[in-house]
Amino acid sequence: MRRYLRVVGLCLACGFCSLLYAFSQLAVSLEEGAAGGRRPQAAVVSWLADGGRGTGRGAGSAGPGQTGRYNLKPRPNEEMHLAVVACGERLEETVTMLKSALIFSIQPLHVHIFAEDQLHNSFKDRLDSWSFLQRFNYSLYPITFPSDSAMEWKKLFKPCASQRLFLPLILKEVDSLLYVDTDVLFLRPVDDIWSLLKKFNSTQIAAMAPEHEEPRIGWYNRFARHPYYGRTGVNSGVMLMNMTRMRRKYFKNDMTTARLQWGDILMPLLKKYKLNITWGDQDLLNIMFFHNPESLFVFPCQWNYRPDHCIYGSNCREAEEEGVFILHGNRGVYHDDKQPAFRAVYEALRNVSCVSASAVLLHGFRGWNGME
């Protein structure tokens, strides 16, 4: 019991300190905006056709074949790219995740949102109201699968979940990307995990955290009916990708002696293993990196901290020593009472009103830091 209370206390303390840091970064952003004048936030709506291979259609004042951009001037070497896939009742979770990312980010951030058509207007309304957070723009996309196999991909695991597999093929102009699930919360700047791209060696194309640190409670090593990476598999809820390398690489596989590129290997993998996989696209990624282990960079559990790390006692040593960097509230823990620490952090971020709190936070933190 004492161990459980200590873990809960650790989570709450990390969340509280992270929120304080977030508000200070928001204050700095607002102060810079006040000094330089308000700059419209960028909003781009991109529509894809023919399995993501068609041309995009811009929104707003953009003409055919253009993207509708406002005068945000991202610095190409510093802009980070974040992607999320939202379907069904995931709007509020996704907005809360984006809020945590935008409050914390230091460098410019471009958010790529893949969502069902009926959610687009809601996303646009919410994000357009954050125009004072100047260091971001966003693009909205429909859920898009290859036309000849769309139904098979839609039925895999959960609706829309396998969309992430096609991001390297759809976002052809994006070099690197951080994909996160909707139930993720950033407790540090996105810049920190983005910086891990510089630690990739010449063969690594993506980075993920282990599915489990403790094999005795691992799922893959006890139940999987297919190959998986390492001792306990990897979790794809937070996935950092060098997509240029992913598009160029030829992958070893157990279907043919010939190596296959990303766009050619996905459907054969699904056909071979669809009766043996439980977690859909995550299982396919595990199979792929089982055969190509040199291509994966594994980051510690604090970058993808889930209920599994504290539900049976604490088993994420890095989080105990350095804190939680990214909180992943899978198992629906943001919406029930099973993990009160997770829910408390989620509700704190969900309830932050960026517009109403901004002026108060700017004045308060400036005074607190002895600036006034």
Image (cartoon, rainbow, N blue to C red):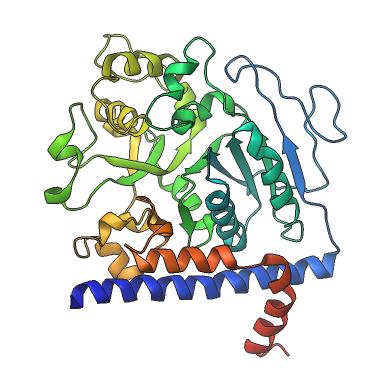
Residue 323 visible (yes or no): no
Counting from the top left corner in percent of width and height, residue 192 is at 49, 57
Quadrant containing the N terminus in the rendered view = bottom left
Q: Quadrant of residue 261?
A: top left
Counting from the top left corner in percent of width and height, residue 364 is at 67, 84
Counting from the top left corner in percent of width and height, residue 256 is at 27, 9
Residue 290 visible (yes or no): yes
Quadrant containing the C terminus in the rendered view = bottom right
Counting from the top left corner in percent of width and height, residue 235 is at 33, 43
Q: Is residue 92 left or right of residue 358?
A: left
Frontmost residue, 284 versus 106: 284
Q: Is residue 83 left or right of residue 334?
A: right
Frontmost residue, 89 versus 139: 89
Frontmost residue, 198 versus 207: 207
**Which residue is painted at 35% across and 57% down in the image?**
305
**Which residue is painted at 20% across and 26% down in the image?**
226
- Residue 89 in the image: above or below residue 61: below
Tally of numbered discs: 0
